[in-house]
Amino acid sequence: MTGSFLGDLMQTIAERGRALIGPGRAVSPSPPQLLDLCEALLSSRGEASGVRLAQDIVTGWHALPEADRAPFLRGLATQFGPDLKRLERAIRHYQESPSPLLAAKLHAATEPRRQELMRRLNLAPGGTSALVRLRETLLAQTDAKGDLAALDEDLTHLFTSWFNRGFLVLRAIDWTTPANILEKIIRYEAVHEIHDWNDLRRRLEPEDRRCFGFFHPQLVDEPLIFVEVALTRGIPDAIAPLLAEDRVPIRATEATTAVFYSISNCQTGLRGISFGNFLIKHVVETLSREMPRLTQFVTLSPVPGFAAWLKRARNDTSDLLSPDDHASLATLDTPDWSASAESRKGLEPALLHAAAAYFLDAKDKRNRPVDAVARFHLGNGARLERLNPFGDLSAKGLKQAHGLMVNYLYRPDDIERNHEAFATHGEVVAAAAVQKWRTPPRRSLSDRLRDLTVPTPS
């Protein structure tokens, strides 16, 4: 309601501006003309005329043919940098007489003009959505790391402020939610495909299912991120029983565990803007108030990079895998190995050794765990609780992870300590059930540090 009210208000301002100033120029979907309008918007002093120009630019952007969008983006990147004369003047004044005030003016002078341009475009009805779509197009450009990188930095900087936690609204999503939002839940689901409306209904309507999403006042009917939750009697080790058509729901009052089994980011244009950590913590708080009987909050998470990493590990000479494991893992080269219970049983120990190495020992160039999902949950203070071989035997699960899934445990009393261990020491906080599969087994850093602080009994 708030977003709709604000949108209507800005639309009214724009319409009054047109009445005062006269009909606006027809916006031709041409990059040079749109860039000229951007210059005019930055030079505008009137509120109404500025909103009108911003709306013309937004309309023109939507009308641009696909082939003309990259030239327009390059124009934004190259023509709307800092005001060099202003910057040189600010540098000279600060060098002549350094002071906090002149330092602030120097900082302001370094800001690219396009940041103010984006702020003014954001005032147009639909401006926020248009800028999110603009960055989506930007990220799709093959040279986004080249001359468009500065434009991406500016949009990321602004979005971090505009989409901070204070502006986000947590909304429960259920079978009574308006159909236009439910349709987007089907479309945006990125972990476990929702096949049709009946499938969606099974995930939203039963008493032991929940779904929550973050929304922004300027994108009223567009979820930014959503999480699907299963209420269960224990920690699950496979996804199929949770999504089975013939499963028998339990009463919510019987549940002891909340399982976050799918977290989907919805807006490609907001990639890199973190919402998930706030979402999980807020949902934990909400469910704890609603159902005090819940004692465990866990994920059932995919491991999308495991199969690719294991292929590389099997081909190199690293010591992360033992010779015996290398031999056992040859089963993965057998067609349809997953269909055989005997093959799965023989493969399981080697797969678990490899999974422990993947999570606990394999690092990227920044000395972080190579798994992006792990970095997300560990950075939020979760503990790697359990490895689940063959937890997802779908075609996607086999292709990405040879069926491997994992549980991350969110224990409120441990979240801060786990986060500090990961952020400060890079430690992957893992339960004993995970550590035991490490080859050779090693005690965790947190256990060793705890020994140093706890006196040895005499």
Image: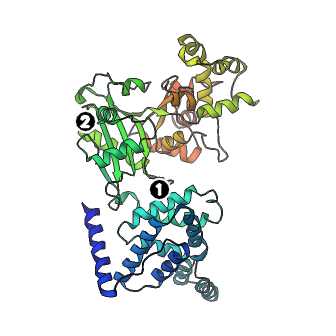
Please say whether residue 458 is visible from this viewpoint: no
| x 48%, y 53%: residue | 268
Residue 10: which disc? none
Mark 2 is on which residue type?
Met
Reading the image, the residue beneath label 1 is 270
Identity of the residue furthest to the right in this view: 317
- Observer-side mark, 1 or 2, equals 1
Q: Secondary structure at mark 1?
A: helix
Q: Secondary structure at mark 2?
A: loop
In this picture the colour scheme is rainbow
Q: Can you give x and y, in whole percent of width and height, for residue 333 in the image?
A: 66, 21
- Which quadrant does the N terminus fall into? bottom left
| C-alpha separation, residue under disc 1 versus residue under disc 2 | 32 Å
| x 51%, y 61%: residue | 135
Mark 1 is on which residue type?
Leu
Residue 33 in the image: above or below residue 46: above
| x 39%, y 39%: residue | 413
> Nearest the camera: 286 or 126?
126
Please say whether residue 375 is visible from this viewpoint: yes
Report crowding for label 1: few under 14, some 14 to 19, many 20 or more residues within 10 A (C-alpha).
many
Residue 235 in the image: above or below residue 454: above
Q: Earlier in the sequence, mark 1 or mark 2?
A: 1
Q: Can you give x and y, in whole percent of width and height, for residue 131 in the image?
A: 45, 64
| x 60%, y 17%: residue | 347
Residue 302 in the image: above or below residue 66: above
* Left or right for 282, reference 176: right
Reading the image, the residue beneath label 2 is 291
Report crowding for label 2: few under 14, some 14 to 19, many 20 or more residues within 10 A (C-alpha).
some
Write down the quadrant of residue 45 in the picture.
Answer: bottom left
Write down the quadrant of residue 446 in the picture.
Answer: top right
> Nearest the camera: 94 or 164?
164
